[in-house]
Image (spheres, rainbow, N blue to C red):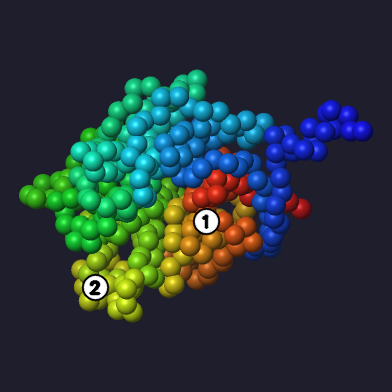
Amino acid sequence: MLKPFMWILFFFPYFLFSQTVLKFSSEDMNIQVEKLASGLGVPWGMTFISDGKLLLSLKDGRIKTLDIATKDIEDVLNAPDVLYDGQGGLLDVQSSPTFKKNKLLYFTYVKDIKGKGVTTLSQARFEENRLSDWKDLLVTKSASDTTRHFGSRITFDEEGHIYFSVGERGVRANGQDLSTHAGSILRLNIDGTIPKGNPFISEKGKLSEIYSYGHRNPQGLFYDKINKNLWSIEHGPRGGDEINLILKGANYGWPIASYGKEYWNPLYVGDFREKEGITNPTKVYIPSIAPSSLIVYDSNTFANWKGNIFSGALKLRHLNRIVLDKYNNVIKEERLLQELGERIRNVIQSPKGNLYISTDSGNIYRLVPFK
């Protein structure tokens, strides 16, 4: 008969140990994938609040913490009311660049405004597993009758700016309409005020928060502090997912220029693939991978991946790795973790340089080196 302690180890390893589910090699590095947690709904956003603790935003509106060492999962109190419908809900979360000092978190979520959902950027203070001082920094002008294409990801630069993405809300014309926030990447000061250097701040009929436009549904956004580049990745329709290097005031073409096709016939969306005055994508995916996040890896933990772009893929269920040359041209693509067969919702880098991914199956995985 098994002793009680051994019975616990046999039947409940999840609570005590990381479970290695996959090993693989890439760029002469040996890597193992460990499952840290499961049963979490759809963990849309992840951010480290200490070297050993993750904070998770779940699409259904819940917020949780995950202790990496013990695997303990705890609820965070005072989560906001969100419109959880269709593609809407609680979206991204990022800890402040000075989180250790001010304990501030930034969220994007879908807010109910007269029965319609709008992407909203908010701020709250985190202490003792509860939120306080909740404040909406920008309730975007992005309402529509649809429940799709809300975006959204958050990132910071080193000059005190916060960027976040908003999808075109299923209304194609919004992509070229600067009187709406829909279909844009927005830039604010970290306190929610509008930077004086924003491209449309003094132009009549154009919203001052807009930094770039012509986007369909950008669900990955990352500022590379080493090379000072702002990157996004967005969903195309049937084909035409794009990685874009985001430039101030630039137009990225949706819906007048796209490599994507209509869902209902083989015709391209828009009259152009490329057009003067429209910034071309760095990479186009045909067929679509359905990208949901983006980072630029910058650690020596996986030294041969340094400077590579990583993105989660929902439809094609893998971790997408892109290698760029010094001119930001794509020279290699690798599709990792296909064996998991899961829709990868988010990928982030830990303070120690490991990669963490969340999936729509409610799982959290960690990629670590092994010899």
Residue 125 against residue 220 in the figure, above or below: above
Q: Position of residue 223 (x, y in %)?
A: 40, 49
Residue 59 against residue 281 in the figure, above or below: above
Question: Could you say whether the residue bearing mark 1 is in a helix, strand or loop?
Answer: loop
Given residues 114 and 194, the one toward you in this image is 114
Q: Position of residue 272 (x, y in %)?
A: 25, 76
Q: Residue at x 79, y 32 (%)?
A: 8
Q: Which mark is residue 343?
A: 1
Q: Amino acid at mark 2?
A: Gly
Q: Position of residue 298 (x, y in %)?
A: 53, 50
Q: Residues within 10 Å of mark 2 (few under 14, many from 20)?
A: some
Q: Earlier in the sequence, mark 1 or mark 2?
A: 2
Question: Could you say whether the residue bearing mark 2 is in a helix, strand or loop?
Answer: loop
Q: Which mark is residue 270?
A: 2
Q: CA distance from mark 1 to mark 2?
A: 29 Å
Q: Quadrant of the N terminus?
A: top right
Given residues 192 and 227, the one toward you in this image is 192
Given residues 93 and 57, the one toward you in this image is 57
